Amino acid sequence: MIIGACEITLHLPECHSLKEKRQIVKSVMARVRNQFEIAVAEVGENDRWQIAKLGFCCVSNSSQHSAEVLEHVQRYIEATRPDLQISDVEVEVINW
């Protein structure tokens, strides 16, 4: 079993409250879940309204497939949400 994990840090420059941030984060998470059928959660920076850390995880039988899915997630966010800036990406593929 191969587990692909990714943490993406988003900068939300147009966000001016935690309420706005919550709307944006929920939207991004729902779109990614529906498009790629992977697990996603907000994993950090909960109290900062212009920064969001999202964690993504997929399980596969191929490390190449896991890495590709997580790369597609990053590209999908960049393509569908040009108002957001990806400031950091960490990817790890684990053999279980």
Image (cartoon, rainbow, N blue to C red):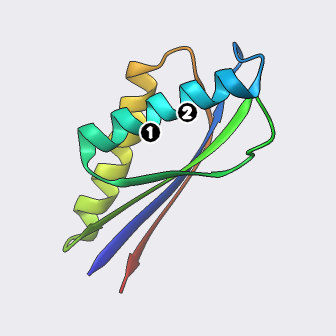
When asked about the image quadrant of residue 57, the answer is bottom left
Secondary structure found at label 2 = helix
Left or right of 77? Residue 18 is right
Q: Residue at x 69, y 25 (%)?
A: 19
Q: Residue at x 26, y 81 (%)?
A: 1
Q: Which disc number belongs to residue 5?
A: none
Q: What residue type is labelled 1?
A: Met
Count all numbered tags in the image, as a single digit. Answer: 2
When asked about the image quadrant of residue 20, the answer is top right
- Within 10 Å of the Cα at label 2, are there few (<14), some (14-19), or many (20+) other Cα atoms? some
**Which residue sits furthest left?**
61
Quarter of the image that includes the C terminus: bottom left
x then y, percent, for residue 49: 77, 30
Distance CA(mark 2)–CA(mark 1): 6 Å
Residue in the foreground of this view, choosing between 64 and 42: 42
- Within 10 Å of the Cα at label 1, are there few (<14), some (14-19), or many (20+) other Cα atoms? many
Q: Which disc number belongs to residue 25?
A: 2
When asked about the image quadrant of residue 13, the answer is top right
Q: Which residue is drawn at 25% across and 63% down?
A: 64
x then y, percent, for residue 83: 56, 14
Left or right of 35? Residue 20 is right
Depicted 89 relative to depicted 30: above or below: below
Secondary structure found at label 1 = helix
The residue identified by callout 1 is 29
x then y, percent, for residue 46: 73, 45
Q: What residue type is labelled 2?
A: Val
x then y, percent, for residue 32: 35, 39
Do residues under tags 2 and 1 come within 8 Å of each other at their CB atoms?
Answer: yes
